[in-house]
Image: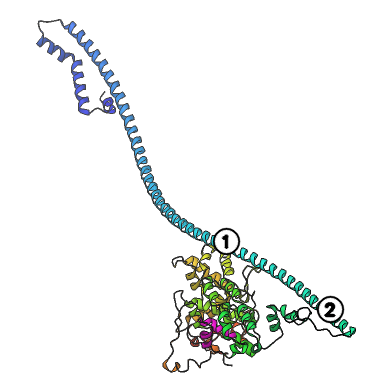
Amino acid sequence: MSHRYRTSGFPVSFSLILTAYLMSLTSPTSFLQVNLHSNTNSESYQDRLSRLEGDKESLILQVSVLTDQVEAQGVKISDLQTSLVEHQLKLSSTEEMLQQELLHRTSLESQKLGLMGEVSYLKLKLADMEGKQGHGAERQHKAEGLLKELRILKDKVEHLEDQKLEYEKKLKATKFWLNKQVCLCYYESISSRLRRTQSGGLQAADPDGGPFRRGGLRATAGPRLTRTPESHDNARDLNIPFSQWSKEQVCGWLDDYGLSQYVSLSRQWIENGQTLLAATPQDFEKEMGMKNPLHRKKMQLALKAFTTKVFEKSSELDHIWVTRWLDDIGLPQYKDQFHEARVDGRMIQYLTVNDLLTLKVTSQLHHLSIKCAIHVLHANKFNPNCLRRRPGEENQPSPSEVVQWSNHRVMEWLRAVDLAEYAPNLRGSGVHGGLIILEPRFSSETLALLLNIPPQKTLLRRHLATAFSALVGSQATQEKREYGNATGHVPLTTTAKVKPKKLGFTQFSHLRKRKPDESDYICPIDSAALTANGVSRFPSSTHRGLSPSLDRPAERKEQVGIQVQSNGAKQ
């Protein structure tokens, strides 16, 4: 029984006490001694023995019941311990899952913060794009309004031309009718006189009745009555020297030349073409009220062409074409100044730095842009359609083709190399193919600065540099790199300004006597270095168009706004 108690989980002391008690109950000697001593006068021995045996059996039964209960409780305790271990394992696994869930939740919160930051950046970018789109829509609306006005003006011009043709037809018909009437009157007068002569009597002619009355229509009046303003153009078409032009011819020429505002004062001063040929710029300012120095220069260049009788292709380009040319080279903001100054193709050819400063062009980059654009015009013999505005069929354009790209064509190239979002930043920048190829200081860094690409976007700038190098070619890339690494190199910036040259004290005495030199022009004429396709003949620029400023040594190149001495200018 003690073994069973030990297996059931009871203490050893309790088992020993219970065993001793049961053994004392089973011993007959001790039992008889106790009973005889304590109960001598009570029940009999047999009755007590039977009762004790019954108690013993009941106790044994109770012990067996208790033992079974203890075993059952031990089984339950073991089951509970097993269940406790299982629950502890579950609790530990649950804690691990909770830790993982917390870590996952923390990572999700960090991702959420990153996404919220990106959403805010996209919202700002969207607002910026909407602002740009609104600005572009406003520009487009203005452009549409200007196009409508241009169409209206074109219709009016066509209507006026139609009216002019009708008037010319009517004038020719009237001239024919007048000539016919004059001839009829002349023949009638001759026949009447012949009749009077054949009759033998000379009658006094009635001063009021004859066809030859005083104040009547004479036979020579027909050509005089039919003289029209076109007769001045016909006189100019007959290669009459300008010095022999009449006052009306000169005034008509001023009107055609875009200087119609000076016609009224010119009628009071000009006698013939020789008056203008012998005049000085001071006379133009005093007699004609020509205060604008560029108007005086325009007049002087035209009179010089009349005197030397040298035809220049640039003289065919009027001031209206120059405004379209400014659009092509990316400088539309100066169209009003150029139009007011009536700058035409001949003035573009002989443009100086001081002229650009007079036109309020002060940016050094814009000076270089105009200089390279004039170089392209020289190379193409002032062909008005030399610039390319739309992409062609070429897959990889050569530098000789890129040099003729307009500002819009450069923007199309940016869209082709996946930089479409930065292409609108080139409007008004003055960037065109001639500037990209001909200017040695214009690099991919300059283009990135003009496109407003942030410096921290290194991958985007590297992509632009790769595309730029592929566009200009390996030779031009190498020359631009060597020029940038040369000593004394000043990088090209968008904020640099051009200041007028300061004249020394000794130059004031010769200011009026000094004549413009070829080196004063913003793009000196060097016909030996130009070809028809925009590519120079310099040895270092066999396969692309380079300006004289790029091909001369770097130590002799000076800033725009300072007198430039080209290698071939004095040859």
Compared to 200, does 415 lie above or below? Answer: above
Which residue is identified by label 2? 188
The N terminus appears in which quarter of the rendering? top left
- Number of marks in picture: 2
Q: Amino acid at mark 2?
A: Glu
Please give left or right for residue 6 compared with residue 205 in the image. Answer: left
Which circle's residue, 1 or 2, is located before the other in the chain? 1
Compared to 518, does 400 lie above or below? Answer: above
The C terminus appears in which quarter of the rendering? bottom right
Tell me the residue at 28%/21% (across/down). 67
Q: Which residues are magenta?
A: 280-301
Q: Main secondary structure of the magenta part?
A: helix
Q: In front of the other: label 1 or label 2?
A: 2
Which residue is identified by label 1? 144
Residue placed most toward the observer, 336 or 481: 336
Residue 206 in percent (x, y) is at: 78, 81
Q: Quadrant of residue 146?
A: bottom right
Residue 556 in percent (x, y) is at: 50, 88
Please give left or right for residue 16 compared with residue 363 in the image. Answer: left
